[in-house]
Image: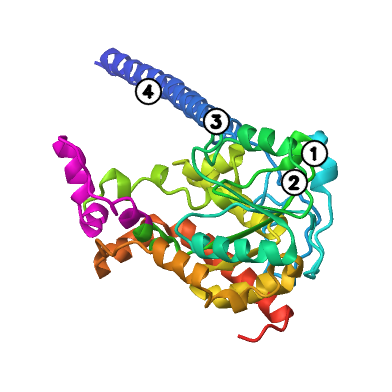
Amino acid sequence: MRDLYLRIGYIFVGVLFWSANHLSKLYEIQVAQEKYFHDKIKTLQRSNIRQGPEPIHDEKIPTHKIKLPSLPKLPSPNSNGGLPLTSEKEDDRNNAVVDNTLQETPINDKFIFYNKMPRAGSSTLYAIIQELSGKHKFTSQKISSGELRDDNPAKNEPIIQFLKGKSLNKYFLTKTHYWLDFAEYEMKQPTFINLIRDPVEWFESRYNFKRRHPINTASISERETFERPISKCVLEEFDECSTRVHQPWLLYLCGTSQTCKDLKSKDKKRRKKAIEFTKTNIAQNFYLIGLMEDFDLSLKMFEHALPRYFNGATKLMSSHKVQAAMKASQSANISSLNPLARKRLATVLADEIDVFEYTKSLFYQKVKDANINL
C-alpha cells in the first residue's frame, strides 16, 4: 500500500513539474507574440509617417515690387501653412520687396493690363477707359474672345506673341484673361488692375447671361438645360451649378500655374494652399482691384492710383456712351435665386467668398490710406 502512495506521489510531482514547464513555454510564446505585434505596429506607423499625403507642387509667387497700403495679415510665403518654395531661377523676383504704401506711379506706368472678369462691370469700365484714352492720349485696346488665334483666358502664348510686336507706351489693355507672369516670357510686368463682384451675384448674372437669347435646338437635353431655373439647378446639384469646373472666378486672380490648378482639387490641403497662393498674389501682384458693388468709390480709387489714365473718370458716369454701355450689358433677370438656393450656392462658392472678402478688406484699407471720401 505504501508503494502505491509513493507512486501516486511521484506521478503528482511529475505532472506539476510538466505543467510548470509547459506554462513557462506558453508564457514565453505569448511574450514573443506580443513583442512581434508591437514591433509590427511601430513599423507600420513609421511607414505611414514617411509616406504622408500626396506631395503638393512647390511654387512661390513672383513679386514685382508693387506698392501697397497697410494690409491685413498676409499668409507667410515661407511658413508651413503659407506658400511653397520655388526654384533658384525665380529667387530674384520672389525676394522683391513689397512696401506698405500706394504710390501714384505703379510698377509699370506705360502698360496697364485690366484682365477683366466678365459680368463684373467690365463693359461700363471699358466705356469710361475709351472716353479717357482720347483725353489723356493713351492707347486703349480691347481683345475680345476669339480675336486671337487659339486664344482663351488660360492660354498665355497667344497674348504674349501679340504683345511682343506692340509699342507698349501708355498702353491700356482690356482682356478677359487669368493673371500671368510676364517675366516668364522675358517681358516687363505690366500693372495689373481688376474689378470684381460678389461670387454668388456673379454666378447668377453669368447663368442668366448665357440664356439671354432663345435657343434653337432639337435636343431635349439641351433645351432642358437652357430652360432650367437657377434655383432648381443649384438645389438639385446639376453639374453647371455644383462643380468648380464651371466656376473660374478665382483663376482671374490666381493665374495658370500648377498651384492655381489646385483650386479645382478635391484634396482639401492642396486647395487650401492654392487659396493662400491666390490671396498673396492679389496683395503682391495687383496694383488695385475695385468692387462692382462699390463702383463709384472704385472709380475714385482708380483716379487716385492711376491719374495718367483715370483722371476725370467719375465725371463720365453720366455720359451718353457710358450709360449706353451700362444698359447694353445688363442681363435680363430670367431666373433668380430663392433664399434656400442662394444659401446652398454660398456653400459651393465658400472659397470664392473667402477670397472676395479678403480682397474687399484690401480695397477699403487702400481707400482709408488714400483719404478718399466715401
Q: Earlier in the sequence, mark 4 or mark 3?
A: 4
Which contiguous range is marked in magenta?
A: 206-235
**What residue sits right under mark 4 in the picture?**
16
Kind of residue at badge 4: Leu
**Tags 1 and 2 in contact by the CB under 8 Å rule?**
yes
Kind of residue at badge 3: Arg
Q: Describe residue 282's horizontal placement relative to residue 228 as left or right.
A: right
**Tags 2 and 3 in contact by the CB under 8 Å rule?**
no
* Relative vertical location of residue 47 with respect to residue 113 in this rendering, above or below: above
Q: Describe residue 351's horizontal placement relative to residue 362 as left or right.
A: left
In the rendered image, residue 109, in percent from the top left (x then y), is placed at 79, 58
In the rendered image, residue 61, in percent from the top left (x then y), is placed at 71, 46
Residue drawn 79% across and 54% down? 110
**What residue sits right under mark 2 in the picture?**
62
In the rendered image, residue 314, in percent from the top left (x then y), is placed at 61, 77
**Pick the front one: 329 or 290:** 329
Residue drawn 45% across and 67% down? 324
* Relative vertical location of residue 237 with respect to residue 86 in this rendering, above or below: below
The Cα–Cα distance between marks 2 and 4, rounded to whole angstroms, is 81 Å
